[in-house]
Image: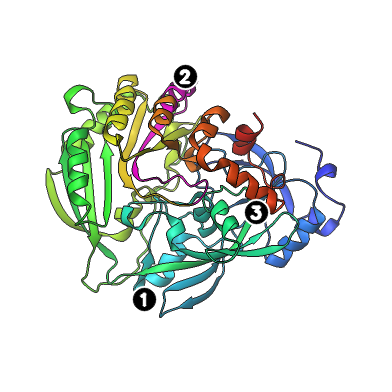
């Protein structure tokens, strides 16, 4: 890391407002020492950027898994305190809020009034700005990604100037920023379209399936009738039972029961031993989880139990030990999706490296230049960090590339520059030209994009 004198102009007021901290992705790998600045107001940020030398990166809820939200040789701008709700139009359902607002705060404020998120990732502790930067997707496959519910946003460029980006204004920068992982500027505030609902509960049907083929048939049969689809898979079972698991398909209830209630969260008190998550413990858990699920069960679930089951644990990543976890999430095109996911999952089950979290769901393409979603399916598998994991995932990357697929950057911590450029080749040049046009190309950096673009 360069000496601080090279990064900051001398000013005692602003020198007090940053500090060196240990920061990490949600998965716990990597952990680095980095400079963090926390503005209280937009004015603080403008003045700070005009006084500072170096590179920047906005950081939201810290819920991206790997190194996407870490700048280890510049300044990390922690946006948590820029978390005001600015305006809400009850007729249109458009919320204007600062980018540091967490999804949880939106739900807590508006659910009882009959409004919910069109698209949400698997945690409500992500921020709105982070969801734009990652172009987050979720169980609502019909709604697509976050891009589809963003009406526009204000973006601070490297020189401190602010531009408004939407489909009609600075549209090239709009599409470069959605899914652009913070490499185009600092998202200040967002106009977000909310969804009208009449209940805080979900009608959920849980179905146990025997293998991957059965899952694909079930999902295809459910697409017209159900708004939400999600499937958990057993990452250890081979042979005829490969890909067995549990499908949840759901719609919003229409019972008029609108309420918000806090649920007690459970804390994992300490890091487990690094060997806790192994092929034996994972197999035992998977067998128990699969056996306990009813073959076909209809139930009414509170929204948080359906959308955010892992949020019940404040720090569930600690079960993987101090070395952390790596999530491998890929999207593969609709044409040939079953064959590609079968090949990937076959190698994963044979390796016995996969963990208790493995999922498959459909996707719809986003037009964000660097966005992950394509028309097809996504497979996500958690792995406990190990030295032999990198070479194994490199081999899986070749299968994904051959299919025309890509890795989700918000979950990544290890993708090579070569594989990244092959996966995102269709839009990478246009994205880089847009960054050059707005003079932000060398102003915003992360460990991830140092790995991708400087290799």
Residue at screen point 57% across, 60% down: 171
What residue appears at the point 27 percent right and 36 percent down from the top-left corner?
Answer: 233
Viewed as shown, does residue 281 lie left or right of 129? left
**Are the residues at dot 1 and dot 2 in contact (C-beta closer than 8 Å)?**
no
**Relative image position of residue 120 (x, y in whole percent):** 40, 56
- Whether pointer 3 and pointer 1 mark residues with C-beta atoms closer than 8 Å, the reply is no
**Disc on res. 113:** 1
* Residue at image coords 47%, 34%: 271
Q: Is residue 244 above or below residue 139?
A: above
- Between disc 3 and disc 1, whose residue precedes? 1
Residues in magenta?
Answer: 368-397
Question: Gap between marks 3 and 1, in whole Å?
Answer: 33 Å
Q: Residue 133 shows which numbered tag?
A: none
Q: Is residue 386 magenta?
A: yes
The one of 124 and 221 positioned closer to us in this rendering: 221
Residue 388: numbered disc: 2
Q: Which residue is mark 3?
A: 185
Where residue 213 appears, as percent x and y from the top left, is 19, 34
Residue 215 lies in the magenta-colored region: no
């Amino acid at each position: 890391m360069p000496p601080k004198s090279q990064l900051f102009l001398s000013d005692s007021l602003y020198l007090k407002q940053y500090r060196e901290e240990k920061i990490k992705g949600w998965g716990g790998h990597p952990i680095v020492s980095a400079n963090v600045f926390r503005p209280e107001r937009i004015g603080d940020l403008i003045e700070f950027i005009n006084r500072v030398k170096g590179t920047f990166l906005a950081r939201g809820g810290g819920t991206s898994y790997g190194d996407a939200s870490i700048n280890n040789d510049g300044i990390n701008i922690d946006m948590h305190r820029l978390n005001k709700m600015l305006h809400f139009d009850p007729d249109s359902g458009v919320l204007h809020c600062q980018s540091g607002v967490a999804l949880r705060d939106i739900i807590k404020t508006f659910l009882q009034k009959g409004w919910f998120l069109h698209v949400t990732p698997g945690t409500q502790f992500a921020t709105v700005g982070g969801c734009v930067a990652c172009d987050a997707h979720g169980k609502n496959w019909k709604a697509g990604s976050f891009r589809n519910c963003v009406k526009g946003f204000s973006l601070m460029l490297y020189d401190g100037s602010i531009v408004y980006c939407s489909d009609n204004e600075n549209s090239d920068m709009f599409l470069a920023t959605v899914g652009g992982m913070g490499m185009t500027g600092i998202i200040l505030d967002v106009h977000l379209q909310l969804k009208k609902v009449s209940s805080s509960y979900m009608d959920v049907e849980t179905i146990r399936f025997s293998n991957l083929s059965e899952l694909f048939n079930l999902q295809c049969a459910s697409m017209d009738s159900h708004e939400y689809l999600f499937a958990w898979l057993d990452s250890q079972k081979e042979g005829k039972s490969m890909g067995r698991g549990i499908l949840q398909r759901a719609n919003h209830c229409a019972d008029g029961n609108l309420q918000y209630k806090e649920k007690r969260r459970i804390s994992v008190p300490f890091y487990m031993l690094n060997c806790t998550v192994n092929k034996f413990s994972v197999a035992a858990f998977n067998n128990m989880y699969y056996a306990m699920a009813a073959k076909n069960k209809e139930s009414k679930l509170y929204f948080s139990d359906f959308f955010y089951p892992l949020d019940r644990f404040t720090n569930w990543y600690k079960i993987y030990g101090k070395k952390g976890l790596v999530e491998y999430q890929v999207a593969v095109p609709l044409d040939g999706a079953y064959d590609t996911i079968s090949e990937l999952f076959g190698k994963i089950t044979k390796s016995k490296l996969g963990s208790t979290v493995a999922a498959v769901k459909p996707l719809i393409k986003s037009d964000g230049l660097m966005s992950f979603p394509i028309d097809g399916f996504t497979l996500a598998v958690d792995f406990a960090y190990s030295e032999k994991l990198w070479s194994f995932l490199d081999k899986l990357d070749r299968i994904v590339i051959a299919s025309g697929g890509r890795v989700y950057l918000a979950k990544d911590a290890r993708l090579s520059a070569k594989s990244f450029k092959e996966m995102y080749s269709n839009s990478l040049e246009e994205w880089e030209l847009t960054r050059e046009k707005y003079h932000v190309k060398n102003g915003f950096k992360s460990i991830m994009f140092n790995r991708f673009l400087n290799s």
